[in-house]
Image (spheres, rainbow, N blue to C red):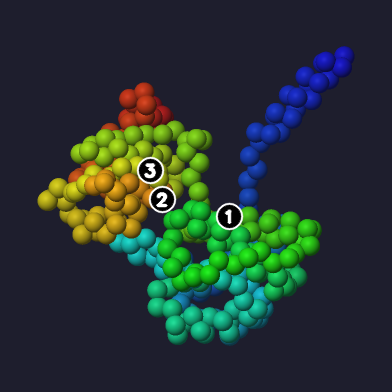
């Protein structure tokens, strides 16, 4: 009987361990523009994210929540370069951003995170800044050259630190929800890996809903073919995402591309059909693994 109960309990635990719970995110487009000012939050959570274009900072005048302690990220994105960000905390975002508006040229929008319910303290947002800079540097998907100093963790009581750790997980989720991958770290062991050795490269990566990610450590072709249409952009991206050592360009961070073909183009330095270029260790193409799965 005891053995039977242990077996049943083990089966129940396994069942519940594989359940994936959905989330409901409420997004409100304040001016009706999908690229404009908006806020978002997860149901039954206190973290609220505001996305404010630099062109609409006047919105801060009417939003009292943003006159209080907040954690924020300034983002500057350019298709030809690695995106840039500045991570910070403040007791009053409206006042703080005035300084950033006059002194920092790179950014186009701000993500501001506040509590929907009780106001956070100065120590709370300092802890969020500490966690965020550490994880963003580990991800290495954004340039953080404006964050010249690495903050230390403030002294929070254990229960409050746990609460802020949960709050930070919601920050990461909401940032990813709007397409900002500043905290995303690839888990290649959990992914179906694909490889290419075209034109002397030796690259590997995986495909998912975000696109095709070329992994850190991949070797990129030393040059691109003369007819390559995005030669200048390719050269700039190689310099930003790879390190040259003994004549070999090696990826120093993961890089996610919108399509498998763009990823293959980048690695080989020439136009490619990524669906047939990328193959897994069994020799199966990306096309046969993913695009033919419904046949």
Q: Quadrant of residue 165?
A: bottom right
Query: In front: 18, or 185?
Result: 185
Q: Residue furthest right?
A: 1
Which residue is disc 3 drawn over? 217
Which residue is disc 2 drawn over? 253
Relative horizontal placement of residue 271, taking residue 274 as reference (left or right): left
Q: Residue furthest left?
A: 226
Which residue is disc 1 drawn over? 173
Crowd rating for badge 3 (residues with CA inside 10 Å; few <14, some 14–19, many 20+): some
Check whether the beta carbons of the residues at disc 3 and disc 2 lie within 8 A of each other.
no
Relative horizontal placement of residue 118, taking residue 112 as reference (left or right): right
User: Can you tell which of label 2 and label 1 is closer to the viewer?
Assistant: 2
Relative horizontal placement of residue 269, taking residue 22 as reference (left or right): left
Query: In front: 295, or 249?
Result: 249
Q: Is residue 234 visible?
A: yes
Residue drawn at 69 percent across, 55 percent down: 166
Q: Position of residue 181 (x, y in %)?
A: 48, 56
The first of marks 1 and 3 along the sequence is: 1
Measured in 3D between alpha carbons, the distance from the residue under mark 3 to the one under mark 2, in whole angstroms, is 8 Å
Give the quadrant of the C terminus: top left
Measured in 3D between alpha carbons, the distance from the residue under mark 2 to the one under mark 1, in whole angstroms, is 21 Å
Q: Position of residue 182 (x, y in %)?
A: 49, 58
Residue drawn at 22 percent across, 38 percent down: 200
- Asked if residue 112 is positioned above or below residue 136 in the image, the reply reads below
The first of marks 3 and 2 along the sequence is: 3
Check whether the beta carbons of the residues at disc 2 and disc 1 lie within 8 A of each other.
no
Query: In front: 220, or 34?
Result: 220
Helix, strand or loop for disc 3: loop
Check whether the beta carbons of the residues at disc 1 and disc 3 lie within 8 A of each other.
no
Marker disc for residue 232: none
Crowd rating for badge 1 (residues with CA inside 10 Å; few <14, some 14–19, many 20+): some
Residue drawn at 70 percent across, 60 percent down: 164
């Amino acid at each position: 009987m005891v053995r039977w109960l242990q077996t049943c309990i083990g089966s129940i635990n396994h069942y519940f361990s594989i359940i994936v719970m959905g989330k409901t995110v409420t997004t409100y487009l304040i001016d009706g523009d999908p690229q404009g000012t908006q806020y978002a939050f997860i149901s039954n959570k206190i973290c609220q994210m505001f996305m404010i274009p630099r062109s609409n900072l006047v919105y801060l005048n009417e939003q009292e929540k943003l006159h209080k302690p907040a954690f924020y990220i300034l983002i500057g994105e350019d298709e030809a370069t690695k995106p840039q960000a500045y991570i910070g905390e403040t007791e009053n975002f409206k006042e703080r951003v005035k300084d950033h508006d006059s002194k920092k040229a790179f950014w186009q929008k701000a993500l501001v995170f506040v509590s929907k319910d009780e106001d956070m303290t100065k120590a709370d947002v300092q802890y969020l800044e500490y966690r965020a800079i550490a994880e963003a540097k580990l991800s290495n998907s954004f340039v953080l050259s404006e964050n010249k100093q690495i903050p230390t963790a403030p002294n929070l009581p254990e229960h409050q630190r746990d609460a802020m750790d949960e709050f930070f997980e919601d920050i990461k989720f909401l940032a990813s929800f709007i397409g900002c991958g500043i905290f995303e770290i690839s888990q290649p062991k959990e992914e179906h890996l694909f490889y290419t050795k075209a034109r002397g490269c030796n690259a590997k990566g995986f495909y998912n809903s975000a696109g095709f990610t070329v992994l850190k450590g991949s070797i990129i072709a030393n040059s691109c073919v003369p007819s390559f249409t995005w030669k200048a952009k390719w050269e700039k991206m190689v310099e930003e995402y790879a390190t040259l050592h003994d004549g070999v360009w090696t990826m120093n961070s993961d890089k996610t591309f919108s399509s498998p073909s763009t990823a293959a183009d980048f690695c080989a330095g020439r136009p490619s059909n990524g669906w047939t270029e990328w193959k897994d260790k069994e020799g199966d193409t990306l096309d046969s693994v993913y695009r033919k799965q419904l046949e």
